[in-house]
Image (cartoon, rainbow, N blue to C red):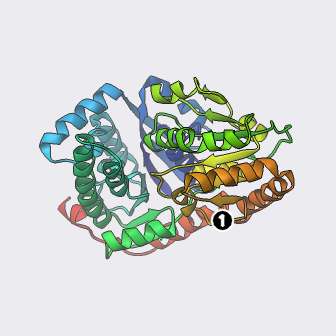
Amino acid sequence: MRIFYVCRRVPFPPDRGDKIAAFNTIRHLAARHEVHVFCLGDGAQDVANISGLQCHVNSIIAAPVTEVTIKLRALNALATGSPLSVAALNEGRLHRAIQQKFTELRPDLVIVYSCNMAQFAKHLPDVPRIMHFGDLDSMKWQLYAEQSPPPSRWIYSIEGRRLLAYERQIAHDFSHALVHTEAEKRDFERLIPGVPVSVVSNGVDLDYFRPAGAIKQPGSLVFTGVMDYRPNVDAVAWFCNEILPIVQAEIPDSNFTICGSRPTRAVRRLARRRGITVTGWVPDARPYLDRAAVFVAPLRMARGVQNKLLEALAMGLPCVASMVASRGTLVAEDDGVLVSDDPRTFASHVVDLLRDGGRRVELARRARAAAEANYRWEDQLSRLDQVVATLVSRPLRRTASASAN
């Protein structure tokens, strides 16, 4: 089968949420099918990552966009009525490349990852199209609005409303929708009824993320993530302001490492405080996970599956997480994850784990076991195989956009 796969960034290396999902999906599909990848890119540096993907796919075309271009397009969209996050990525070079290859190769299936990339496949005629939403981004923008002061609150609220209308349109235009979790599916069915939708969750590379047996650093806590992503910035700020001082009052030598690329100025300033390290970009996060005693996931704006939490579980790290961070996992509380949204209770969980080596070791064992039981990529992507097989074996569902072509 010939598949076109469309995504936001060059899906290599798999070092952030969207790249992790896209890379593993592409690698899985390419083992059985002919796969052609079309993507934007975060500038020339991201395009340089193409070489790491070429051995997995038949072809890849990337059209890099700059941050300046993205911001100017989003600003212009405020006046046009389009969703800002969709207009920001409306890159003509990628539109033309996909249309040319579509005419030349006539794929059997098109898969799009992330709603703001649907514009590049919306008008492709007479082919089954899967929209992999992952999460409903409109709900993320509404959450940002609730957590922000004016004027950001107004802009985020506008984007949430516009994007939900767009998500509804795209969901009805495409043949099938995918989301990451059962909770996201319930939200999808409530907000966008009448559209076929399936759950295909993320997994974790259990061979790559496994304990290497490093000596644990006493009192060490760690968080990983791209550190210019607002939910991650908010998470570490809340942890450092509200939770870490309580932990350090009980365990003065406890320390916190924020491991991730592109830290904002606000994140870098946290390193001025006692016991806090901000690494910036590192080539491999696993040594930081392997040396840490406890992983913390104090996210307050999270939706869907948190890859950072899956990776920590796979590394055999006991985790303390917020409710929203843990909600997307299939891991029961005490099977490697302790959960609280209350700063004092969260801190109490951390202190108890740092003090009780026996419990820490037991939760570490359960964490790895939970990852192995619930998050093998091949198990998750077998659900995608079922959706694909069903779609290509039945007559094409005619949609409004397809009928217009």
- Across and down, in percent, residue 338 comes to 66, 59
Q: Is residue 272 left or right of residue 178?
A: right
Q: Residue at x 50, y 66 (%)?
A: 388
Number of numbered discs:
1
For the residue carrying disc 1, how many other residues have a C-alpha within 10 Å: few (<14), some (14-19), or many (20+)? many
Q: Residue at x 31, y 39 (%)?
A: 89
Residue toward you, 138 or 205 = 138
Q: Is residue 117 left or right of residue 377?
A: left
The residue that label 1 is drawn on is 331
Residue toward you, 3 or 67 = 67
The image quadrant that residue 94 belongs to is: top left
Q: Residue lying furthest left in this view?
A: 79
Quadrant placement of the C terminus: bottom left
The image quadrant that residue 190 belongs to is: bottom left
Q: Residue at x 35, y 43 (%)?
A: 98
Q: Amino acid at mark 1?
A: Val
- Across and down, in percent, residue 79 comes to 12, 41
Residue toward you, 337 or 244 = 244
